[in-house]
Image (cartoon, rainbow, N blue to C red):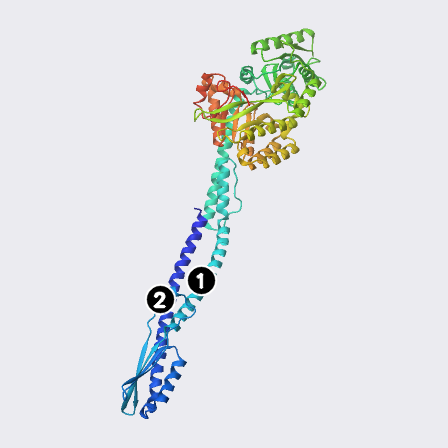
Amino acid sequence: MTLFRQLMMTIIVIFSVILVVVMGINFNTTKGYLINQLESTTQDSATSLSMTVSDFMAAQDYASVDSAINAVFDSGYFSEIRMHVYATDKDIVRKNETKIDGVPQWFIKLISFDVPQANAVISNGWNELGQVYITGSAGYGYNQLWLASRNLLVSFFIIGVVTILFGSIALRFLFRPLGEVVKQAEAIQHRQFIKMKNLPKTRELKLVVQAMNRLTEKLEKDFDAEAETVQWLQAKAFKDPVSGLGNRNFFESQAKAYFSSSDRTMDGLVLVSLSDLGKLNNERGYEAADLFIQASANIMTDKMKTVASSSSVARLSGADFIILIPNIDQDRLKHVVEDILEGLMVLIPNQIAYADAVANIGAVSLNGRVSRSNAMAQADAALREAKTAGSNTLRVFDAITGQDMAIGRLVWKDMLEYAIKNRAFLLRKQKIICFEEAGTVMHEEVFASLDYEGKQYHAGYFIGLAEQFDLGDQLDKVIILRVIEFITQRHGDQRQTPLAINLSASAYSKPTFTDWLDKTLQGLDLAIRKQLVFEVSEQSVLAVEDQAIVLSEVLKRHDVVFGIDNVGKQFTTFHYLQQLLPDYVKVDPSYTKLATGKESEAFFMHILCKMFNSLNIQIIATGIESQQQLSRLEKFDITAGQGYAIDQAQEM
């Protein structure tokens, strides 16, 4: 029970006790007054009547005596007048049945009212002629007691209602700071550090608010320090201090996780070697060489943002850089490499590079069957051939065995438009298993394959192209509607687990798509919405954070679970988590490899999990490909896991 209700009930109880006490005192006072008044009236009437009839009694004029008795009986509240005449030894009686009008029977039975009786001697001179006895009527007393009690009760009820009404308003006003403190505490739970600026005037509440503000400030500093520690460890282990890109360790962890995945399609591996870096360093100094490295890194990073947000750019050593581009065909890879070289050429007129030589680039187009060592060897061979050809040259090799997937860009566009129009997608789902409750399924992630002319194409082949052709929102709408239909058809089975849909940045970055999703969810039953989960990648969040916040607000408004995928792949402070407050995060597969590797590498995973848990965010480890990894990860503070060692994707 809330404090407000407790105080209101206390006020009502106190007011009721006061009402009972006041009514008891008033009732007894009124009753005593009425009895005294009736006794006085009865005695006065008896004395007056005895004096009135004394002469009539002496003259034995009993007709006049009878008239006098009637006059007194009719003029007062009496139940009986009895006159005893000594001369005749007879009684003259006037009696009336007591009638109590307007008083409930329960009140009459509940209240006892002592009826007074008075008498007086009738005398004429020294002779006693008789006696008169008058008994009062209880009707008058009951009537007056009932009216007094009722009026007092009605008055107290009106006063009580007004008091409770104004009291509740006053209490709500006084409790506003407590309500703000509750919101502040809930915000702290979600790592949102809100401070109350308007302090209440009530001394006790003011002290509580000030204490909460101090606590909020301390927790904010602790979280910032924790986030900075994670960022520092991440940079120390995986970031090149000169270029700001990932270092060799970073690329190795990314490559191990990526090449071990069985969902690979068409990829590109690019090696970039800056020319004459040693000469630049010797002749112009370290600052000039560092400027050359930083400018080159910025150009490569900017180019990759327009190509694929999931690409990995790293500096291997000295003048050598490497780029891993997922989901890209050979023609587009060649175009990207030419674009990178063209961007680097700008450094020559700006006198950042040494002389007219800026770089050589070697690239290789891969498919899922090419191993990491083979890919590196072929990319290295392409780079050597480019260097042999002279300065500022590039070479792109084709390592794809089998040309069945070598489809032109325009053909892909036609295929995507056909699939969207005809909803020609096959859906599969893969389980995410909870670690704490063995065998419990947290949810299942949905994967889509394009079905065209009897052939199926994994999402890796067309997702990147869909975004390039600005078809990402249309593609996501089709997948969402297919999943909703599937959930609706199985709705009778309560044992079914939620299904997770990964949204592309090109979709939710459009307000029209977010509005469509909002209206679609609004038209669904709560039971169906509870079986929907949406997730976005960390790369897309960092690219369009404002739109991601709008998306998260829409999903929370409809009680739909929201998560972030590939967390930790980018060099970030993780402060975006405080704005989005996802229900869960999926840690990038490269960190899964780290967690099951060396003790020093596993330590970073421990720190990362600690930070997520401090935000009350569930952690899902992805890319679990062996039982050894699974057993090691269960020792971490991780909620659930996903990978082929746990479950393989099944058709829906």
Q: Which element is circle 1 on? A: helix
On the rendered image, what quadrant is the C terminus found in?
Answer: top right
Q: Which amino acid does label 2 sit on?
A: Ile
Q: Which amino acid does label 1 sit on?
A: Phe
Q: How crowded is mark 2: few (under 14 residues within 10 Å), some or many (20 or more)?
A: few
User: In front: 92, or 634?
Assistant: 92
Q: Which element is circle 2 on? A: loop
Residue ID at (60%, 27%):
482
| Residue beneath disc 2 | 111
- What percent of the width, then of the height, locates residue 310? 60, 22
- Whether residue 16 is visible here, answered yes or no, is yes
| Residue beneath disc 1 | 156
User: In front: 284, or 188?
Assistant: 188
Q: Mark 1 or 2, which is nearer the eye?
A: 2
User: In front: 167, or 532?
Assistant: 532
Gap between marks 1 and 2 measured at Cα: 21 Å
Compared to residue 200, the image places residue 156 above or below, namely below
- What percent of the width, then of the height, locates residue 184? 50, 41
Which tag, 1 or 2, sits closer to the chain's start? 2
Q: How crowded is mark 1: few (under 14 residues within 10 Å), some or many (20 or more)?
A: some
- What percent of the width, then of the height, locates residue 127? 27, 91
Residue 451 falls left or right of residue 356: left
Residue 486 — which label? none
User: In the rendered image, which quarter is residue 13 located in?
Assistant: bottom left
User: In the rendered image, which quarter is residue 240 located in?
Assistant: top right
Tag count in the figure?
2
Residue 499 falls left or right of residue 139: right
- What percent of the width, then of the height, locates residue 408? 69, 16
Residue 395 falls left or right of residue 249: right
